[in-house]
Image: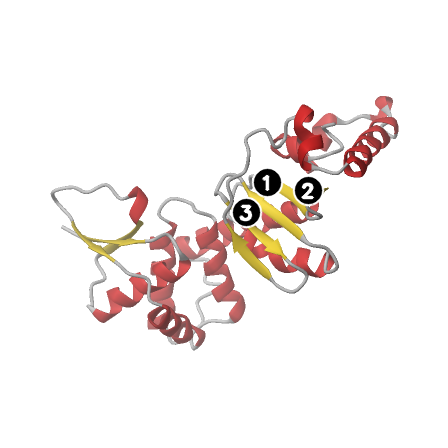
Amino acid sequence: MKTILKYDGTFEGLLSSIFYAYECKQFSISIEKRKIHEPNFFDDSVAIISDTSKAKRVWKGLSKKTSTQGKMKLYKAFLSEIPNVENLIFYIIRKSLSSTINIETDFSDPKILLLEKIVKKVNREKHRMDAFVRFRLTQDGIYFANVEPDFDVLPLNASHFKNRYADQKWLIYDLKRNYGIYYDLQKVETVVLELSTDLNYRNKTSFYFTPEEIHFQKLWHNYFKSSNIATRKNMKLHIKHIPKRYWKYLSEKNC
């Protein structure tokens, strides 16, 4: 029999779960998101309430054992949403806190090596979002983009877009996770909206976006098409650099 710690799906909730494990000295546990937990007759379950102070204590304690970069890797692994990643993070935090040396690069441990591989995938997706996000100017004067990244990388993209588009109001919305990041010329904040299902329909664009924006999108699409040299087309290489799953959000691919 083992104990299942059910948390709310936030990083703060995960750290609160780890605090609970140490506080109760229960290490034969499994940490699961509350929304995906399936009760059974053989395991006990405990509902963990997110506690900012407890989460900060875990994070601060980890600072004594690992670098800022090492902590960031744990956060990026959490954003991967890979099944059972919570228990991988718990394992590495436990090993870090109990070790007298920094274990970040101990790749002889399969779990630390696995963490490194996950982080690389998340970093790759983050950089692709930096490159492939395409804004459209709405009737409300906000530059809007919708995305569906493989991993929950918007928190990692926020600083890039804030620095790059500091003089514009913009909103990047993750349709897959139903939340977005909005910049109001001063700060970036998380927002949750009810977006219309016809937002990306061509015959509805004039309702949401300015005429100038629609015209610009067509010009960009035509430029991309005319500058493409058919005899030098290498579709295999093109797909390698711009996977097809991103095409539906690229103005140069759609008009």
Q: Is residue 163 left or right of residue 9?
A: right
Q: CA distance from mark 3 to mark 1?
A: 17 Å
Mark 1 or 2, which is nearer the eye?
A: 1
Colour pattern: secondary structure
Residue 192: percent from the left, percent from the top? 50, 48
Residue 87: percent from the left, percent from the top? 33, 54
Q: Is residue 9 above or below residue 59?
A: above
- Dot 1 falls on a residue whose secondary structure is strand
Q: Is residue 2 left or right of residue 140?
A: left
Disc 3 to disc 1: CB gap under 8 Å: no
Q: Which mark is residue 147?
A: 1
- In this rendered view, identify the residue nearer to me: 238 or 17: 17
First along the sequence among labels 2 and 3:
3
Which of the 4 quarters of the picture holds residue 108? bottom left
Residue 235: percent from the left, percent from the top? 73, 26
In which quadrant will I find the C terminus? Answer: top right
Q: Which mark is residue 121?
A: 3
Q: Which mark is residue 132?
A: 2
Residue at image location 84% in from the left, 28% down from the top: 222
Residue at image location 25% in from the left, 64% down from the top: 21
Q: Amino acid at mark 3?
A: Lys
Q: Is residue 134 above or below residue 61?
A: above
Mark 2 or 3, which is nearer the eye?
A: 2
First along the sequence among labels 3 and 1:
3
Q: CA distance from mark 2 to mark 3?
A: 16 Å
